[in-house]
Structure formats: structure tokens, C-alpha cells
Image (spheres, rainbow, N blue to C red):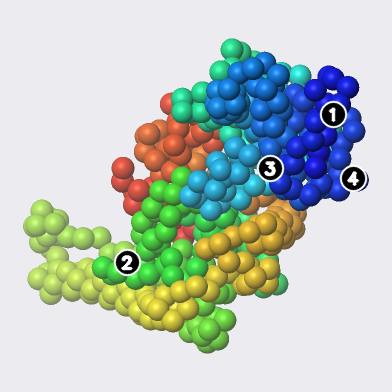
């Protein structure tokens, strides 16, 4: 039972249908906040809605109007700007199909919920979201989190609000947006791409420890196709295959759900060796033997090419004969040229043969891993094993963030070891790839599609200034890894 006073001498009693403990009753409740019952109570939001409805019925009694009419007015109002923001976010998030986006939304709303608890305003309506409220919430986030995280969490709050206001079916009437001309704090940490020299220094930096090697390979793999870090960190063997004489990745991007179907070169597949050798321990030994043979042949070929015999044209031969050179001498010179050309071809065939052997070896392993271990993660990271990316929850997301944080920690060590001035982080690989493509003169629209950006404005952040065939871009980036 709850007591609703009608202003007369005798209070009226009505039942809400819920049990309310005395400690959960809010003595300082305000009708505009609809916070009669504290958040400690079970079903507090439903109880507060019920009380609001009962007050409407009481008002109908006192004013002599029909209950049905008042209830309809109350429902219409609740559908509009008086709608609960948190209740709307539950529906909004549940309808978000992309898993990574849904997790980001949930993380952002958790921060808002905590703030609303502190100010005792959990029944926040769209009418309550004013410019002053936004400033208060933004400053609260700044006090607890970095500028980048603050902008991310506040962005979730703003995005859901704007989508609700833009939905005509909700009938939310807001004369002036509380976010109009809202000033954000600038993020002090920015991602700067590596220079070509710095990239080379990183590529050739020795990795005496396995964790260092995996971290460097993840960075180079990201760079090879300008992937996002989560697309590489959460890569599974089922995402990699061999078809039509090509290695390829076939998966959906994390943010836009765009399907990425790209060929990857032999050099990029070799970056996966630390993961492959967990199942096939001798793969590194076999590949190193092939690579040593190829390097030796390339060195011998280079020496051979330093002093090549001059090719003889018909005019050269006539000139030599006129100068007294005999037919036997001329024939000897011609044989030397033919022998040299034949030797060069043999060396090249042998090198190609070894590359083909390497391709066959890796093809065998990739196909077997794709078929027998499709749900296993590619990279050897302990925290990954507990993650279920098909139904990722808050714990899974936290485990993934630990993996990225650990990866960034090893990148800082590699940065110091390589003597690089540019600050290394996981996302720098994507920025570096974008800048290299742009500096090469590639079309801006093509780059934007390759990065799977939904707007050119996002792509502009990845390059310093403005000026599809995705395989062309992949092949171009691979030349830096070879």
C-alpha cells in the first residue's frame, strides 16, 4: 500500500501491486524526477512508473475527467520528451546488431548510470538533458577518465540521444539541442605515423623473446592491410584460407560490419609462423632452411650480375669481323653471353622453386588449421582463450582490452630498442599504412574504401593533408614488409 494525499483531511490508499520496503522509500522524492522509490528496490523503475500512472488516475478523479483520457495523455507524454532515457538505451542497445558496437555502447551507458546514481537522477528524461546537464556529466567524466575515454563515453550518450530525437515515431520535441556548439576537450595523445626510415628500423629490430616477435608481427600484419587492432587481435584460423592459388582473409570488420575479402602475400602469411608452430613445431625450422637457401642463391646471383658479358648485336659482330676477329673468337663470345643468360635464368628458376615450396608448405598448414581449428585464435595471447567473440560480454571485453594493453606495452619496448622517436601503439600501424598510401599518390576515395570508413571525414584524420581495387593497395603495402 502507498499513501497518496489528495489535499483533504483523509488520505486515500491505493496499491501498486509491488511490495515497497520502508528503507527503499525516498522521502525527498520529486514528481518531475519520478524517484519515489530508491534504486535499491527491486523493479524500482516499474514501481515509479506505476506510481506516476496512479497519480494520473487520482488527478482524473479530482478533476472529474475520465481515467482513460488521462491515462492516454500520460502514455503520450511518456512516449515523448518525458520518456526515460535509460529505458530507451536498453532497447537501443538490444537492437544493435554489431557486437563490438554494442559492447562500446554498454560501457558508455555504465558510466552514465554511475553518474546518475550519484546525483540521484536515474529516472532521467529527455527533457532533463539540458546543456547544463551535459556540462556536468562531461566534467564528471573528465575527473575520472582520460580525455580520449571521456570523449568516447560522452559520444555514446550523445549518439543515442540524437538517434532518439531523430526518430519521428518517438515524438520527442526538443527546441534546441543541448549539444549545439558543445566544446570538447582536445585529446592530448595523438597517433602519429612512422616515417619510412622508422618503419625499416622497426622491421629489422631483433626480437630475442617470443612476446616481442608476436607483437612486431601483429603490428606488421595490421600494416599490411591497414586493419584495426581488434580485427587482427581477434583473428581466428577460420578467417584465413587458401583458394584460387592465393592466401586470403575473409571476415567482417568490427565497426561497420563490412565484409573484408582480401588476398594476403606469402610474406604476410609468414608473420603467422609463431601461431602455426603451436600446432606444427617444425614449421619454423623448415621455413628457415628454405629461406637460407633462397638468400644464398640471391647473393650468388647478385655477384654473377656484377660483371655481365656485353650482349652482341648484329652490328657489333660485323664490326668485330671487320677488325680481324675470327669466327671462333666471335662464337666464343656469343657462347659466353648465352651461358650467362642461361645461368641467370637457372638461378631465378631455383629461387622461384624455393618460394613455391614455401607456398606449398604454408598452404598445407593454413588449410589444415582452417578446417580443424577454425575457432582458435591466431595469436598466442593467454587472455584471448577466455573470450567468446560470438557473444562477447563485459568480462570478454575487459580481457580483450588487457591483450591490447599488453601488446602496446611490448610495442613501447620495441620502440626503445629500435631507437624510434615516434610513439608506438597498436593504432599507429593503421595510421602509418594510411599515410604511406596517401604519400604514394593513391586516390583518396580508394583509400577511404580500403580503410572501410563510412565517411571521408574519418579518413581525413588518418592523413596529414588531402590531395577499387583493394588488392593493389595490399600489394603496395606488402612491398614495405618484403
Whether residue 448 is visible? yes
- The residue to which callout 2 is attached is 246
- The residue to which callout 4 is attached is 22
Cα–Cα gap, marks 1 and 2: 81 Å
Which tag is nearer the camera, tag 1 or tag 4? 1
- Work out whether mark 4 precedes mark 2 in sequence or the reverse, and give the earlier one: 4
| Residue contact at pointers 1 and 2, CB within 8 angstroms | no
- Work out whether mark 3 precedes mark 4 in sequence or the reverse, and give the earlier one: 4
The residue most toward the front is 10
Whether residue 129 is visible? no
Cα–Cα gap, marks 3 and 2: 58 Å
Tell me residue 407's x, y (percent): 68, 59
- The residue to which callout 1 is attached is 11
Identity of the residue drawn at 58% across and 22% down: 66
Tell me residue 469's x, y (percent): 31, 46
User: Residue 311: which quarter of the image?
Assistant: bottom left
- Work out whether mark 1 precedes mark 2 in sequence or the reverse, and give the earlier one: 1
Q: In the picture provided, is 425 more to the left or to the right than 305?
A: right
147 over 330 or under it: above or below: above
Identity of the residue drawn at 43% across and 66% down: 239
* SS category of the residue bearing label 2: strand
Cα–Cα gap, marks 3 and 4: 17 Å
- Work out whether mark 1 precedes mark 4 in sequence or the reverse, and give the earlier one: 1
Identity of the residue drawn at 46% across and 63% down: 268
Q: Quadrant of the N terminus?
A: top right
| Residue contact at pointers 3 and 2, CB within 8 angstroms | no
Q: In the picture provided, is 164 more to the left or to the right than 206?
A: left
- The residue to which callout 3 is attached is 46
Which tag is nearer the camera, tag 3 or tag 2? 3
Amino acid at each position: 500500500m502507498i499513501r497518496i494525499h489528495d489535499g483533504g483531511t483523509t488520505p486515500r490508499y491505493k496499491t501498486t501491486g509491488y511490495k515497497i520496503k520502508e528503507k527503499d522509500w525516498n522521502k525527498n522524492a520529486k514528481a518531475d524526477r519520478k524517484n519515489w522509490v530508491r534504486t535499491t528496490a527491486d523493479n524500482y523503475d516499474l514501481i515509479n512508473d506505476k506510481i506516476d500512472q496512479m497519480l494520473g488516475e487520482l488527478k482524473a478523479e479530482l478533476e472529474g475527467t475520465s481515467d482513460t483520457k488521462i491515462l492516454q495523455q500520460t502514455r503520450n507524454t511518456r512516449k515523448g520528451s518525458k520518456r526515460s532515457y535509460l529505458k530507451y538505451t536498453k532497447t537501443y542497445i538490444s537492437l544493435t546488431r554489431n557486437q563490438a558496437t554494442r559492447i562500446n555502447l554498454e560501457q558508455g551507458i555504465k558510466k552514465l548510470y554511475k553518474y546518475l546514481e550519484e546525483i540521484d537522477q536515474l529516472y532521467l528524461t529527455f527533457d532533463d538533458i539540458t546543456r547544463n546537464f551535459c556540462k556536468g556529466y562531461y566534467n564528471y567524466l573528465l575527473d575520472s577518465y582520460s580525455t580520449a575515454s571521456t570523449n568516447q563515453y560522452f559520444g555514446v550518450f550523445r549518439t543515442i540521444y540524437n538517434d532518439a530525437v531523430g526518430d519521428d515515431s518517438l515524438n520527442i520535441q526538443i527546441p534546441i539541442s543541448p549539444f549545439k556548439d558543445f566544446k570538447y576537450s582536445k585529446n592530448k595523445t595523438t597517433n602519429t605515423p612512422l616515417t619510412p626510415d622508422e618503419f625499416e628500423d622497426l622491421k629489422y629490430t631483433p626480437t630475442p623473446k617470443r612476446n616481442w616477435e608476436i607483437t612486431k608481427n601483429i603490428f606488421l600484419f595490421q600494416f599490411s592491410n591497414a586493419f584495426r587492432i581488434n580485427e587482427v587481435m581477434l583473428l581466428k584460423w577460420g578467417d584465413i584460407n587458401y583458394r584460387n592459388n592465393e592466401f586470403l582473409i575473409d571476415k567482417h570488420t568490427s565497426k561497420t560490419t563490412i565484409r573484408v575479402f582480401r588476398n594476403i602475400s606469402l610474406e604476410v602469411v609468414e608473420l603467422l609462423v609463431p601461431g602455426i608452430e603451436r600446432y606444427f613445431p617444425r614449421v619454423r625450422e623448415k621455413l628457415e632452411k628454405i629461406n637460407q637457401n633462397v638468400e644464398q642463391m640471391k647473393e650468388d646471383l647478385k655477384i654473377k650480375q656484377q660483371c655481365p658479358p656485353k650482349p652482341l648485336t648484329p652490328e657489333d659482330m660485323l664490326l668485330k669481323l671487320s677488325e680481324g676477329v675470327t669466327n671462333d673468337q666471335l662464337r666464343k663470345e656469343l657462347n659466353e653471353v648465352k651461358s650467362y643468360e642461361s645461368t641467370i635464368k637457372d638461378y631465378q628458376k631455383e629461387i622461384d622453386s624455393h618460394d613455391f615450396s614455401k607456398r606449398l608448405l604454408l598452404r598445407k598448414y593454413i588449410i589444415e588449421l582452417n578446417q580443424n581449428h577454425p575457432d582458435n585464435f591466431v595469436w598466442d595471447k593467454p587472455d584471448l582463450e577466455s573470450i567468446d567473440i560470438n557473444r562477447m560480454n563485459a568480462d570478454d571485453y575487459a580481457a580483450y582490452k588487457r591483450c591490447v594493453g599488453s601488446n602496446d606495452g611490448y610495442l613501447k619496448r620495441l620502440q626503445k630498442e629500435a631507437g624510434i622517436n615516434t610513439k608506438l601503439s597498436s593504432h599507429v600501424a593503421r595510421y602509418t599504412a594510411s599515410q604511406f598510401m596517401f604519400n604514394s599518390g593513391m586516390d583518396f576515395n580508394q583509400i577511404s574504401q580500403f580503410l572501410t570508413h563510412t565517411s571521408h571525414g574519418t579518413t581525413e584524420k588518418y592523413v596529414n593533408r588531402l590531395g577499387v581495387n583493394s588488392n593493389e593497395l595490399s600489394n603496395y603495402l606488402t612491398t614495405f614488409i618484403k
